[in-house]
Image (cartoon, coloured by chain):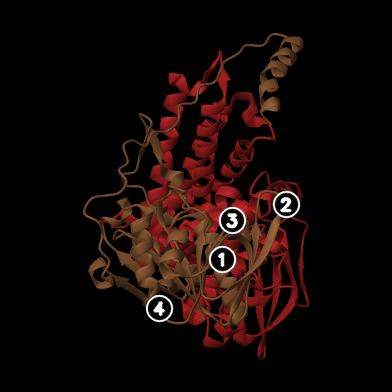
Chain colours: A red, B brown
Amino acid sequence: MDFTLSKEQLLIRNTARDFAEKYIEPLVRRIEDENDVPRQIIDRMAELELFGIQFAEEWGGSDGGYDGYVLAMEQIARVSSGVSMILSVNGLGLGAICTYGTKEQKEKYMEPGLTGELLASFAFTEPGTGSDPRQITTMAIREGDSYVINGTKRFISNANFHGPIVVFARESESDEVTAFIVDKFCAGYSISEAWDKIGLKGNRIVDVYLKNVRIPAENMLGKVGRGFNILLSGIAYGKIGISSTYLGITLRAYEEAVKYAMEKKHRGQSIAKFQAMQLRVGELAIKLEAARWLTYRLGCLANNVKDPMTFAREAALTKSFVCENAVDVTRVAVDIHGSYGVMSDYKVQSLYRDAIIGPQIEGVGDMQKMIVAGTILRE
Amino acid sequence: MNIIVAMKQVPDLHHIRIRNREPVLDDIPMVLGDIDKSALAAAVELKETTQGRVIIMSAGNRKIRDTVKEALAAGGDEAILIEDDDLADEDSSVIAGVLAAAIQRIGDVGIVVFGEGSADNYSGRVFSAVAAILGYPQVGYAKRIELNDSLARVTRSLEDSDEIIEVPLPAVISVVSEIKEPRIPSVKNILKARKKPTAVYHLNELCVEVPAEKNITTISNLAPVSRRKGIVITSVDELAKILKNDRKPDRQAQ
């Protein structure tokens, strides 16, 4: 067992950190205010090949593994979780295409998706269902060599960018949940205004309206009725991105809290001299390391674990812990800042807003615990 | 034309802690200094205009093989390393002799580029000594370099002026950080770095004699003590008075 990062892993981490500090940090306020990520950030991420770390070179990726992906995402989220969520969701959509797609589908979408030319989305949730595939109402009706899709998808990331969207719909002939690839902004595709969520600014989520969207039958992803498996696998791997994002939020909250504790003076001395602050800083350090190594471990497991159920369990427990932990850490970091912690001039308030979203998205916290318990109590 | 970039492995300054006024260097990751990275970025740009080849040269302990990957990821084509666990403690005249011996083994040398000073000791002496040993012309503090087949046109950044000079090739040039911002390596280049050619020499292969007695002995390396004055000011008039008195000697000194 070796917890030492290799030189390559350190360099990937440094590339992401240098990029984030140099290119994202100066624009963070704008991202927060406009809830939008400027195009130049996406282009620069593509130049540095940050979109394709975890994908194989065969499909235009860098072959850096999920371990490299986790390290880069942590550093990007440390500066802007909105930017890292764009990367995460792109990886989620492309990951499904790369794993389940035909050669033609991969050739069409992987390379443009890894160069930032297209950005992928993943659309399962609907107004009437969050986690239960049996409640899906979006329909894909077979008409000769085409499918015609109708339905509404809720809280969809990257839906405002051109690129593929993996849509889960009920296939008409089998009545089974099936995945399809739709090109965003094709005829019949439209989106709502962005939901005004309290954090993760820059990561726009919208509702997607599919009205008589006609796609060729070969745009089916995987086989008829296999949508649920693609969904489970996709969201399991998607949890690597969200766990890394919340690790980055945790890291930044820790850094901001330590900096403030060292700088802030009370009666002539640094508040870091007070035991109450020392206990809080100690707690943050412990929680940061726990989240960090659980997330790094998930990245390594993603490279190596073959059984989808085993990986789903590890992903669920990591996502559950890291996201709930981020809420605790950012809350304590706000405490250390006192009144200043809730002022918009201080980074820690936006981290807290980002953090409380985590347990509610990409599988709510209780659902993660049920997945974990399910693997233990199955017998 | 080969463009050689001499780079020094130094402890990552972001990780160094000071304990009892002394730097704690145990378990500190080794990196390349920022000015060295600027020198590399300038060399990579020159390579693109001259169709040359960028060779990274570095001397240091066994960690150097790992550290140099950073330079290979950021645009170096190959690396030549002189590896010896004792080299890190040697003074600049010894290091210059070692580097010069290695450079003499490379054909078609155009320029040898150094950062103006290393990130740790910042003596800035090695480049001059290398030029002297090799008999190459030397130019210090370059902020711009243009190359043709036989000449380097160099803009030197002086305190209150720029000086443009030409030197015949091969030449040794030290650069200031403003010459070029260090490159952020892309992920693919990081992963490809390990496959780039890296030659490792040991001192006996270069026929360089390292003196048994060190020329320079470091007696202590202590962080300066900084104490705040801790003046409590109770009125604007008092502040103005203190600032006025405090600043007067500085102005006179200028």
What kind of element bears circle 3?
helix
Q: Amino acid at mark 3?
A: Ser
Residue farthest toward the bottom in the current orientation of the protein: A144
The structure residue drawn at horizontal position 69% and vertical position 8%, both measured from the top left corner, is B234
Question: Between tags 2 and 4, which lies in front?
Answer: 4
Question: Between tags 3 and 2, which lies in front?
Answer: 3
Mark-to-mark CA distance, 1 and 3: 10 Å
Residue annotated with mark 1 = B41
Residue A213 visible in the displayed image: yes
Residue annotated with mark 2 = A35
Q: State which quarter of the image contains the C terminus of chain A.
A: bottom left
Q: Position of residue A277 (x, y in %)?
A: 47, 24
Disc 2: which chain?
A
Q: Amino acid at mark 1?
A: Ala
Q: Amino acid at mark 4?
A: Ile
Q: Nearer the viewer, residue A136 or B38?
A: B38
What kind of element bears circle 1?
helix
Q: Are marks 4 and 1 in contact (CB under 8 Å)?
A: no
**Precedes in sequence: disc 4 or disc 1:** 1
Q: State which quarter of the image contains the N terminus of chain A.
A: bottom left
**Hey, which quadrant is residue A9 in on the image?**
bottom left
**Hey, which quadrant is residue B129 in on the image?**
bottom left
Mark-to-mark CA distance, 4 and 1: 21 Å
Task: Give the crowd class for mark 2: few <14, some 14-19, many >=20 residues within 10 Å.
Answer: many
Task: Give the crowd class for mark 4: few <14, some 14-19, many >=20 residues within 10 Å.
Answer: few
Question: Between tags 4 and 1, which lies in front?
Answer: 4
Q: Amino acid at mark 2?
A: Asn
Residue B106 tag number: 4
Q: Nearer the viewer, residue B88 or B34?
A: B88
Mark-to-mark CA distance, 3 and 2: 36 Å
Q: Nearer the viewer, residue B106 or B253?
A: B253
